[in-house]
Image (spheres, grey):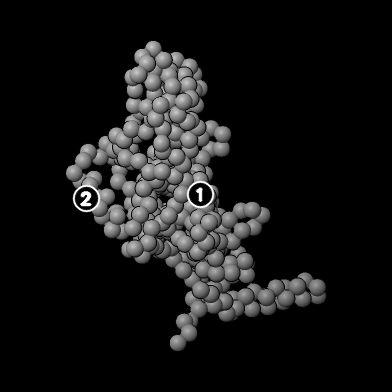
């Protein structure tokens, strides 16, 4: 009697399972060709484009020094004159190497100075900066730096200028990672004036050799400004740089909401022949909206096929083997 009852029970269960209605689900396929954005926000500092100390080239007495902190100068202008110890009544000029502004001054006329060519660590008489162009410096972690390329764009925010966003593109990348923190340096050269001043700068640049620029690369005027606005960026300012890379174009991508994580292992719930099956994946990048993944349930990771189907949202609600069907779209 017990054997007959048990057989009847399992027969009923099998019958009910066979006639179970498939659960309606949102089914998706990998998106291909769209690409995905990956971003990194890191601290950033503003440096002068050029920053040099004007050192005494000969031992003697300072006889001429008029420029002070904040004063501007032009390339080739005499900034300091020194009367050599061995040649009284003679003047040795120290000239400005570029157009710029005096950042600091540490000498006055009448001061005896040693020659920097003879005495090590001689203090500079004037610290000179070029600030019509500034260089933004940021350090990017190794995990993101591998995605940097010519399509990368930046958004600079400065603590002292709340609400302002300066749009830009990286000018140069360091060819190596720093030993101490495994970061790669990224620099952005920005023109620090109005649109009219920038046009004049480019016209002047066209008539002279570009060896006055680092690497011969032109600075850019940041986006997000009105034509009459100047960035007014000053050396020493601090802020953050958001770098955005667009990668994985023409690679299979899935929505982050489709990823099921159980015990620290990621899965997609694949749909085959109307049945949901968990299938293990390897995640390369997940920005919280879109993910670049591969199947990893075999000896080697393999690409998703454009025809692969998976449950697009709330995958944890479905047991392995659940019968599913595409949900009807709401009119």
Q: Which residue is mark 2?
A: 203
Visible in this render: residue 2? yes
Q: Residue furthest top?
A: 86
Picture coordinates of residue 101 (x, y %)? 40, 42
Picture coordinates of residue 319 (x, y %)? 62, 67
Vertical order, 146 against 33 (above or below): above
Which badge, 1 or 2, is on the more N-terminal residue? 2
Element type at mark 1: loop
Front position in the image: 173 or 331: 173
Real-space CA distance between mark 1 and mark 2, rounded to the nearest whole angstrom: 29 Å
Which dot marks residue 267?
A: none
Front position in the image: 40 or 276: 40
Q: Residue furthest front?
A: 89
Picture coordinates of residue 330 (x, y %)? 48, 85
Query: For residue 15, what is the image quadrant?
Result: bottom right
Q: How many marks?
A: 2
At horizontal 51% and vertical 68% (from top left) the residue drawn is 312
At horizontal 21% and vertical 50% (from top left) the residue drawn is 203
At horizontal 20% and vertical 46% (from top left) the residue drawn is 206
Classify residue 233 as left or right of residue 1.
left
Picture coordinates of residue 74 (x, y %)? 32, 40
The quadrant the N terminus occupies is bottom right
Front position in the image: 83 or 176: 83
Q: Which residue is mark 1?
A: 237
Vertical order, 2 against 282 (above or below): below
At horizontal 50% and vertical 55% (from top left) the residue drawn is 158
Circle 1 residues within 10 Å: few <14, some 14–19, many ≥20 = some
């Amino acid at each position: 009697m017990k054997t007959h009852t048990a057989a009847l029970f399992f027969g009923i269960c099998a019958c009910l399972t066979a006639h179970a209605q498939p659960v309606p689900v949102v089914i998706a396929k990998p998106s291909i060709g769209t690409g995905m954005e990956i971003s990194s926000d890191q601290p950033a500092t503003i440096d002068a484009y050029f920053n040099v100390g004007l050192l005494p080239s000969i031992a003697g007495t300072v006889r001429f020094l008029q420029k002070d902190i904040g004063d501007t100068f032009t390339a080739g202008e005499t900034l300091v004159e020194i009367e050599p110890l061995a040649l009284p009544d003679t003047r040795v000029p120290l000239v400005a190497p570029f157009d710029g502004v005096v950042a600091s001054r540490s000498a006055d006329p009448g001061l005896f100075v040693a020659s920097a060519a003879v005495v090590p660590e001689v203090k500079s008489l004037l610290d000179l900066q070029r600030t019509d162009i500034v260089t933004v410096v940021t350090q990017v972690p190794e995990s993101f730096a591998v995605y940097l390329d010519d399509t990368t764009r930046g958004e600079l925010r400065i603590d002292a200028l709340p609400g302002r966003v300066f749009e830009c593109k990286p000018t140069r990348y360091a060819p190596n990672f720093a030993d101490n923190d495994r970061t790669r340096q990224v620099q952005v050269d920005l023109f620090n004036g109005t649109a009219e001043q920038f046009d004049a700068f480019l016209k002047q640049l066209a008539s002279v050799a570009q060896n006055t620029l680092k690497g011969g690369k032109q600075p850019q005027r940041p986006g997000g400004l009105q034509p009459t606005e100047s960035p007014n960026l000053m050396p020493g300012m601090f802020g953050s740089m958001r770098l955005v890379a667009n990668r994985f174009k023409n690679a299979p991508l899935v929505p982050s909401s489709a990823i099921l994580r159980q015990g620290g292992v990621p899965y997609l719930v694949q749909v085959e022949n109307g049945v949901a099956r968990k299938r293990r994946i390897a995640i390369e990048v997940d920005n919280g909206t879109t993910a670049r993944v591969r199947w990893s349930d075999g000896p080697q990771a393999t690409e998703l096929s454009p025809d692969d189907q998976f449950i697009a949202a709330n995958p944890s609600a479905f047991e392995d083997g659940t019968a599913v069907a595409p949900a009807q779209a709401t009119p």
